[in-house]
C-alpha cells in the first residue's frame, strides 16, 4: 500500500514548466513528481503552470491555489513572458514579491527559478531581469536557481526549434537544476 503524501510542492509557472510541445510525463515537474513519490513519506507535486502566464496572472491565481493545496513549498517560475513582452521590471518584481509574501503567509517556503532572456533584449534589460531574482532571493532569504535552463539553453540538441523551450531530452537537466536547490528544502 502506497503512503499518502503528507506534503505538497506547488509549481506556479509558465510554458517552461507546462510541458510546452512535449509529452506531459517528460516534463521536469512530472519527473520531479516521480522522484518525490519514492520518498517516505512521499510528497505530491501540483503543477499549476500555464503556457503564456505572466507574473500578473500568476499573482492573481496564487491565492486560490494556496487555499486549495496548502503547499509546504511553492516553486515560482514566472517572469519569462514578462521579459519577452518587455513588461516593466518593477511590475515583475512587485508581483513576485507579493507571491512570495502570500506563500509565506500561507506557511509555505519559496523556491525562485530565474530565467535569462535572449541577447537581442540588450544587456541593460537582461541585467535588470536577472537582478530581480537575485534581489528577491537575498531580501527574502529564499533559495534561487539563477537560470532554470542552465546547461540546456545553449545546446541546440536540447532545445525546441523556437530556441526558448527545452525538448524532452533537455528536461532531466532542467530538473537537475531545480533539484539542487529544492532537495535541501524537503528536509526542513
Image: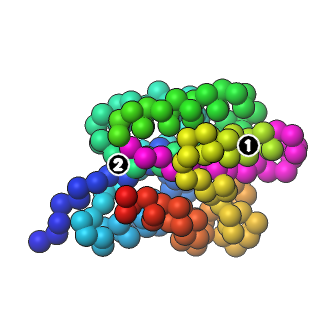
Q: Is 106 placed above or below 144 here?
A: above
- In the foreground, 124 or 50: 124
Q: Please provide percent x and percent y for residue 47.
A: 41, 50
Q: Is 11 placed above or below 3 here?
A: above
Q: Quadrant of the N terminus?
A: bottom left
Q: Are marks 1 and 2 in contact (CB under 8 Å)?
A: no
The furthest residue to the left? 1
- In the foreground, 170 or 128: 128
Q: Please provide percent x and percent y for residue 88.
A: 72, 28
Callout 1: 10 Å neighbours few (<14), some, many (20+)? some
Magenta range is 108-125
Query: In the displayed structure, does residue 177 sit left or right of residue 72?
Result: right
Q: Secondary structure at mark 1?
A: helix
Callout 2: 10 Å neighbours few (<14), some, many (20+)? many
Q: Quadrant of residue 176?
A: bottom right
- Work out whether residue 133 can be spotted: no
Query: In the displayed structure, does residue 13 sit left or right of residue 91?
Result: left
- Decide whether residue 111 is among the magenta residues: yes
Q: Quadrant of residue 170?
A: bottom right
Q: Which residue is tagged 2?
A: 72
Real-space Cα separation, disc 1 to disc 2, in angstroms: 26 Å
**Residue at x 68%, y 46% (from the top left corner):** 134
Q: Which residue is tagged 1?
A: 131
- Decide whether residue 107 is among the magenta residues: no
Amino acid at each position: 500500500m502506497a503512503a499518502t503524501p503528507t506534503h505538497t510542492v506547488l509549481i506556479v509557472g509558465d510554458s517552461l514548466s507546462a510541458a510546452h510541445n512535449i509529452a506531459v510525463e517528460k516534463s521536469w515537474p512530472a519527473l520531479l513528481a516521480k522522484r518525490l513519490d519514492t520518498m517516505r513519506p512521499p510528497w505530491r507535486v501540483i503543477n499549476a503552470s500555464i503556457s503564456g502566464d505572466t507574473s500578473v496572472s500568476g499573482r492573481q491565481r496564487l491565492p486560490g491555489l494556496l487555499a486549495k493545496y496548502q503547499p509546504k513549498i511553492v516553486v515560482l517560475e514566472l517572469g519569462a513572458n514578462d521579459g519577452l513582452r518587455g513588461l516593466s521590471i518593477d511590475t515583475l518584481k512587485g508581483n513576485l514579491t507579493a507571491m512570495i509574501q502570500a506563500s509565506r503567509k500561507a506557511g509555505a517556503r519559496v523556491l525562485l527559478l530565474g530565467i535569462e532572456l535572449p541577447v537581442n533584449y540588450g544587456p541593460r534589460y537582461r541585467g535588470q531581469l536577472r537582478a530581480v531574482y537575485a534581489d528577491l532571493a537575498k531580501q527574502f532569504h529564499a533559495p534561487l536557481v539563477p537560470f532554470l535552463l542552465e546547461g540546456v539553453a545553449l545546446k541546440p540538441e536540447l532545445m525546441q526549434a523556437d530556441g526558448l523551450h527545452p525538448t524532452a531530452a533537455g528536461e532531466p537537466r532542467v530538473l537537475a537544476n531545480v533539484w539542487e536547490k529544492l532537495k535541501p528544502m524537503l528536509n526542513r
